[in-house]
Image (cartoon, helix red, strand yellow):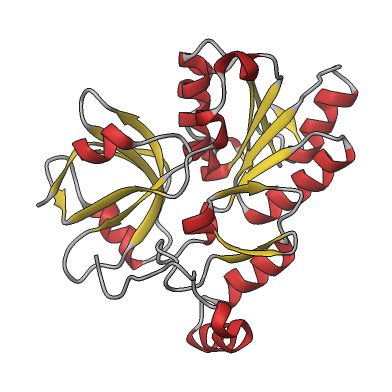
Amino acid sequence: MSYKIVSKKELTENIYYMDIEAPRVAKSANPGQFIIIKIDEKGERIPLTIADYNKEDGTVAIVFQTVGASTKRLADLNEGDSVQDFVGPLGRPSEFVHEDIEEIKKRNILFVAGGVGSAPVYPQVKWMHERGIDVDVIIGAKSKDIIILEDEMKEVAKNLYICTDDGSYGFKGMIPELIKDLVNNQGKTYDEAIVIGPMIMMKFACLLTKELNIPTIVSLNSIMVDGTGMCGACRVSIGDEIKFACVDGPEFDGWLVNFDEAMRRQNMYKTQEGKKLLELEDGDKSHHEDCKCGGDL
């Protein structure tokens, strides 16, 4: 079976949006989950967060940045082309999916998207909007030219705040600085924050939200490699527990995530020597205990 690319567009340089025809995945998809795409028999698994889904049309949207050979090959495909595998939805849905809608409406929720993090944040905010729940959203990036999904987010957010590190668009400063400005200077109050983006941004956002006493959920989709719990790349410490982002997550309590360890592991996993060292360090905790997989999709 193959999965056709229904539409494709370049959101900004090296960041692409694709709608893939995958009726079964679309039917079961929820915010917070991800898929694994594989171009052909020789292709690598590429875990990608679900950026949107249409249950009626049977399509699932993905957003990806070309950072290696596999994503470059994916970017070279066009509308009408197909990929061999499109597996999902994987991971656990966002917790709010299972909550009482009326209880969610009582909370002031802030969504924070850093860089390509706008892709996984969008379906969550859209889910809220479709159920009459108003939320605030921050999109942050280094500069204006790499802000993505701004127009789409405007349609579903109550208030959308933009910040750029260089001040080329919106608030000048990093995401934590904007959060602090909203709370301390603009009188905003939030009962919960959902923060998704680069690991270092999530770390400092969580340090701030803890100081401000705003419980925070983060998504660790950025540390996935295999997407099944088999490779051990997404092994993380959440408080005093060991978890695997692709099986137990990807969303966790941001105050409990050991970001320094996760970033260290992420960098080490990029080399074969680093992988071997991590396997020695992890011992029998290298892989998820429930993983029974082996080989390709």
Q: How many marks?
A: 0
> Which quadrant does the C terminus fall into?
bottom left
Residue plotted at (27% across, 55% down):
74
Residue 86 place in picture, x, y as percent: 24, 51
In-front residue for pair 132/162: 132
Q: Nearer the viewer, residue 47 or 81?
A: 47
Farthest-out residue, top:
132
Identify which residue, 202 or 25, lies in the foreground: 25
Q: Is residue 12 left or right of residue 75?
A: right
Does residue 225 appear in this view?
A: yes
Q: Residue at x 48, y 71 (%)?
A: 289
The location of residue 26, given as percent across then percent down, is: 28, 35
Asked if one can make out residue 159 in the rendered structure from this viewpoint, the answer is no
Q: Residue at x 85, y 35 (%)?
A: 213
Above or below, 167 against 1 in this view is above
Instruction: Determine which quarter of the picture holds residue 4.
Output: top left
Q: Position of residue 81 (x, y in %)?
A: 13, 47
Q: Position of residue 246 (x, y in %)?
A: 47, 57
Q: In the visual, does 108 lie left or right of 94?
A: right
Q: Residue at x 57, y 77 (%)?
A: 285
Q: Is residue 159 left or right of residue 177?
A: left
